[in-house]
Amino acid sequence: MGWLLALGSLAVAVAVTFGTERKKHQVQHGPCSYTFILPEVEQCQTRDFQVTNSLQRDSPLPPETAHAEPTWQERKLENLESATENNTQWLQKLENYIQRNVRSEMVEMQRNVIHTQTATMLEIGTNLLSQSAEHTRKLTDVETQVLNQTSRLEIQLLEFSLSTTRLEKQLLQQTQEVSRLNDKNSYLEQRFAAMETRHSQELQAIQQEKQQLQGLLDRQSRLVTLLEGQLASSTRNSTLLLRQQAALSDTVQRLLATVTHCNDIAIPSKEKTESFRDCADIYKSGITENGIYSIHLANSTQAIKVYCDMKTRGGGWTVLQHRFNGSVDFHRGWNEYKAGFGDPSGEHWIGNDVIHLLTTSQDYTLQVQLKDMEGNQAYSQYERFYTDGEENKYSVHSQGFSGTAGRISSLTHSGTMFSTKDQDNDHCSCKCAQMASGGWWFEACGPSNLNGIYYAGFSNVMRYNGIKWYYWKGPSLMATVTTMMNVCDMMCR
């Protein structure tokens, strides 16, 4: 309340200083401003003014002056006292008003302060909760990491334990193995000692036998010397016999030469008197048995041996190729296919030069005979067949297809060149002669290859390098017999 008393003193001082003038006074309290209008002292009616809280005089008036006429100073003093009492009342009212307003403002301020502090505390609490949640999350993560690390360590410890157990077992097994080896070593040492003893005994026996054999050798040497003397005398006798034998042999040779010369003169060879161009000529001469015969190709003095089939479809077929057991390797080079290989009585290829010379001398028919593992037989026939010479890579030409080995011809198109493993003339970058094996008119590996690898026996494996006649048995023909043969057509028969 000190500040209220100071405010009252200030108001009294203002009233005394300014006298009867009507003045305004402002008091600033916090955000509020209070304006007070002070009363005019000269116009106040003090005669009927009742003061409930009057000021005490310094001393009582004397009795004789109680009803006397007041002086100017007394009136002035009374006015001042009235003004002071009036101001005191105003100050009391002001104090009461200020107390009421200040109390409500203090309550509001306290409420605001409480709200502010509450909001601040809530914010601090929220921040603390957030930090606590963050710390909790971090602690949870750390706990998870620790648990994971602990799990890994436990797993590693378990693995180490298992590894230790396994190593202990291996160590125990190795210890047992070492013990067994030691026992075996002891047994072997005993056997070695026994063998060494026996070897020493055998060595002594061998030395004794050596001495005995040495004695026998000396005796035999003497016998050999005696026999050499006897052999020398026998050699002289045998030399005479050898001379007589040589003279007899010369006489026999002269007699055999004389007999052979007489036979050549008396019986001229039939082959020297007759010359056949192919098996059809031989068949027309009256020979109807299958076999190997000699023929002379057109424009050539060379006689070659060929196999003639005199039984199939009218006879007179010259066999160009024959396979039946896989005994001959058909994966060969250009020069071998050019000259031919194999034996006409077995598996063979007659030769590209022979096929060219034979098929270009006149019109020939080609027949391909096939037989599979189950005994099924089929054939493909071409009414006109021939090949070009080596300058055109033995290109094949055919027309007039018929037969039972497929509804479509498996022989490649006319004009296809011959290819081998060392001379690639096909139309494929894959080198068909190496991939499919053998020598043939491949074109782009084509639907046929009778010179592929001969596979014996049944198999479910798809083989692309075996014997193939596609439009009869697909890409992998398990053939047991293949034969290519040609015959002069009906015009030359």
Image (spheres, rainbow, N blue to C red):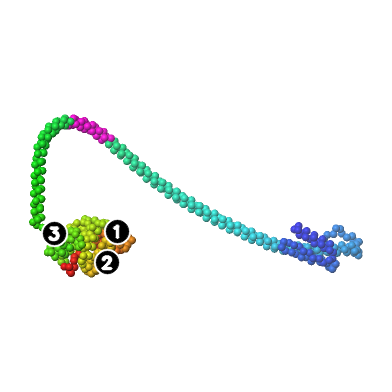
Q: Name the residue rendered at 39%, 44% in the picture.
A: 164
Pointer 2 or 3: first along the chain: 3
Q: Position of residue 267 (x, y in %)?
A: 9, 57
Range drawn in magenta: 189-213
Asked if residue 463 is among those painted magenta in the image, a careful observer would answer no
Q: Name the residue rendered at 27%, 64% in the picture.
A: 395
Helix, strand or loop at disc 3? helix
Q: Is residue 375 visible?
A: no
Of residues 13 and 288, which is closer to you in this image? 288
Of residues 421 and 5, which is closer to you in this image? 421
In whole angstroms, how far apart are the C-alphas of marks 3 and 1? 39 Å
Inspect the image, locate mark 1, and give the three-letter code of the amino acid beneath it. Gln
Inspect the image, locate mark 2, and give the three-letter code of the amino acid beneath it. Ser
| Residue 62 falls in image quadrant | bottom right
Inspect the image, locate mark 3, and give the three-letter code of the amino acid beneath it. Lys
Residue 470 horizontal side relative to residue 169, left or right: left
Q: Is residue 237 above or below residue 323?
A: above
Which numbered mark, 2 or 3, is in the foreground of this view?
A: 3
Q: Which residue is mark 2?
A: 414
| Count of marks placed on residues | 3
Pointer 3 or 1: first along the chain: 3
Residue 123 horizontal side relative to residue 156, left or right: right
| Residue 50 falls in image quadrant | bottom right
Q: Residues within 10 Å of mark 2 (few under 14, many from 20)?
A: some
Q: Is residue 175 above or below residue 348?
A: above
Q: Which residue is mark 3?
A: 272
Which numbered mark, 3 or 1, is in the foreground of this view?
A: 3
Q: Which label sits on residue 197?
A: none
Q: Main secondary structure of the magenta part?
A: helix
Pointer 2 or 1: first along the chain: 2
Helix, strand or loop at disc 1? loop
Q: Which residue is mark 1?
A: 423
